[in-house]
Amino acid sequence: MWVPDAAHEALRDLVRAREAAKRDQLRARHRLAKFLLRHGRRPSGKGRAWTTPYFEWLETVRFPYAAQEATGVDYLHEVHHAAERVARFDQAIDAAVATAPPAMRAVMDALQALRGIAQVAAVTIVAELGQVSRFTRPRQLMGYSGAVPREDSSGSRTRRGGITKTGNAHLRRVLVESAWAYRYAPHVGPALRRRQAGVDATVNEIAWKAQHRLHARYRRLTGTGKCRPQVVTAIARELLGFIWAITVHTEAQQRPVAA
């Protein structure tokens, strides 16, 4: 057991509020997209939705009836409002990270050496997990997350099902989102290189090992015919092992040396 201090509680409230804002943003976008689809409004180009050109096109969409026009304007306003909420939460997270205790900030920086884990994901993991070194083995952390398969065993019979989902749902969500990055071949791009700059060499070695191992596991599991969501869930569970290794190493470095 671990009792969170006031700093962890405050950070947890913030990241969960941002998560709720992201859900609201997704719902607002779905409402507008379905409204446009019902009336046959589609952009002429092949650009991606919710990019700058797409929003420029949205401003030009018109409808034959005033009631439809009012509906479209209101839906678009909600999309912009949701985006502004998320942006405000992102700024608040930036400020919270800058003023966080040094030990907590060190763990956040170290976790960002992993592919697929940027600042928001790292802050969420730290806020939801707290002191990771209380888990003596990575498997304990995996069980705590609820990402391990169910087991129904009796005698010599062993039957496993889907994941238990008995742990922290916020943690599982961010892990699965991060795990999708490992479907790509190992690579250190400009953004990841910036996050790894100044991080302990041991942490970067663990992160590089994670890329090779998790990508190989992704290819092996998809090669057997398993569906990708199940494969990514398995990758997320194994990613926790690398998170455990990095966090325990970083927390040990932050402890004061005994005289």
Image (cartoon, rainbow, N blue to C red):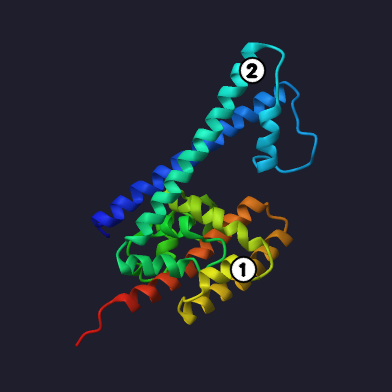
Q: The C terminus appears in which quarter of the rendering?
A: bottom left
In this view of the protein, can residue 212 be seen by the observer?
A: yes
| Residue pictured at 39% horizontal, 68% vertical | 107
As helix, strand or loop, the secondary structure at mark 1 comes to helix
Find disc 1 in the rendering and name its residue: 190
Please identify the quarter of the rendering in which residue 133 is found: bottom left
Q: Residues within 10 Å of mark 2 (few under 14, many from 20)?
A: few
| Residue pictured at 66% horizontal, 53% vertical | 228
| Residue pictured at 40% horizontal, 43% vertical | 17
Please identify the quarter of the rendering in which residue 16 is found: top left
Q: Is residue 51 above or below residue 93?
A: above
Q: Position of residue 120 (x, y in %)?
A: 46, 55
Viewer-closest of 102 and 180: 102
Find disc 2 in the rendering and name its residue: 69
Q: The N terminus appears in which quarter of the rendering?
A: bottom left
Q: Position of residue 21 (x, y in %)?
A: 46, 39
As helix, strand or loop, the secondary structure at mark 2 comes to helix
Q: Is residue 4 above or below residue 215?
A: above
Q: Position of residue 211 (x, y in %)?
A: 60, 70
| Residue pictured at 60% horizontal, 28% vertical | 31
Give the numbered dot on residue 151. Answer: none
Viewer-closest of 146 and 7: 7
Quick one: which residue is furthest to the left in this view?
259
Quick one: which residue is furthest to the bottom in this view?
259
> Disc 2 or 1, which lies upstream in sequence?
2
Report the amino acid beneath label 1: Pro
Report the amino acid beneath label 2: Glu
In this view of the protein, can residue 167 be seen by the observer?
A: no
